[in-house]
Image (tube, rainbow, N blue to C red):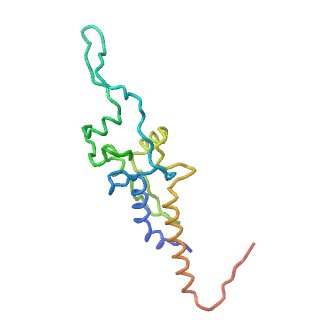
């Protein structure tokens, strides 16, 4: 009952809803959530003990400033940083992951969408507890509900067009 016309109709909306859920670009990442519907956790406090350190020995001795990722992101001074997301916990630093996400192709019974080249970042984020998708929960519940609601409407609309006649149902 769900045909290619249905999937072509909802594909752009599904992609947009997943992007809004995961990255919240309109809100600069402030409303971004993981695939389980929870706000992304705070960044690790590792290296929160910031300051100048001396590294190396002998002639190769030098001073370097050690800072945490969270502090670096908040300053907005990381090379290629997408400054709009500096004060968020959204998984966006340079914007590469955000731009990489999107529609991929239509399939005979659906469509595929996701990350085309940044899969390793998605995997690493999952290892850090910032899950964008998993085998158990591939899409957020809010996106799943949207798809189901649209499918219900589409099927009801298609069934409403069937007037009279017999419908044979074979149970084997």
Outermost residue, top direction? Answer: 58
Q: Is residue 31 left or right of residue 63?
A: right
- Expressed as whole percent of the image width and height from the top left, the position of residue 58 reads 27, 7
Residue at (52, 70) in percent of width and height: 149
Q: Position of residue 27 (x, y in %)?
A: 33, 55
Position of 140 compared to 97: left or right? right
Q: Camera-side residue: 74 or 158?
A: 74
Total marks shown come to: 0
Asked which quadrant contains residue 19, the reply is bottom left
- Picture quadrant where residue 8 is located: bottom left
To which quarter of the image does residue 73 belong? top left
> Where does the C terminus fall, quadrant-wise?
bottom right
Residue 16 lies, in percent from the top left, at: 39, 61
When the figure is inspected, residue 154 is found, relative to residue 146, above or below; the finding is: below
Position above or below: 2 against 38: below
Q: Please, which residue is most extreme toward the right here?
A: 172
- Residue 142, compared with residue 53, is above or below; it is below
Q: Residue at x 26, y 13 (%)?
A: 61
Where residue 44 appears, x then y in whole percent?
42, 34
Quadrant of image for the N terminus? bottom right
Residue at 42%, 40% in the rendered image: 42
- Left or right: where does residue 145 sit relative to residue 9? right
């Amino acid at each position: 009952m769900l045909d290619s016309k249905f999937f072509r109709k909802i594909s752009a909306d599904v992609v947009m809803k997943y992007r809004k859920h995961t990255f919240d670009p309109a809100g600069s990442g402030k409303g971004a959530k993981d695939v389980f519907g929870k706000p992304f956790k705070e960044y690790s406090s590792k290296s929160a003990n910031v300051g100048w350190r001396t590294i190396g020995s002998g002639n190769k001795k030098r001073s370097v400033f050690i800072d945490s990722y969270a502090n670096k992101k908040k300053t907005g001074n990381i090379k290629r940083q997408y400054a709009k997301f500096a004060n968020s916990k959204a998984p966006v630093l340079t914007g590469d992951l955000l731009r990489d996400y999107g529609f991929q192709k239509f399939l005979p019974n659906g469509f595929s969408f996701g990350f085309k080249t940044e899969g390793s970042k998605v995997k690493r984020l999952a290892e850090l507890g910032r899950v964008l998708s998993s085998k158990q929960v591939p899409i957020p519940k809010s996106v799943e509900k949207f798809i189901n609601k649209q499918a219900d409407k589409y099927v009801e609309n298609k069934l409403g067009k069937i007037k009279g006649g017999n419908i044979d149902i074979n149970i084997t």
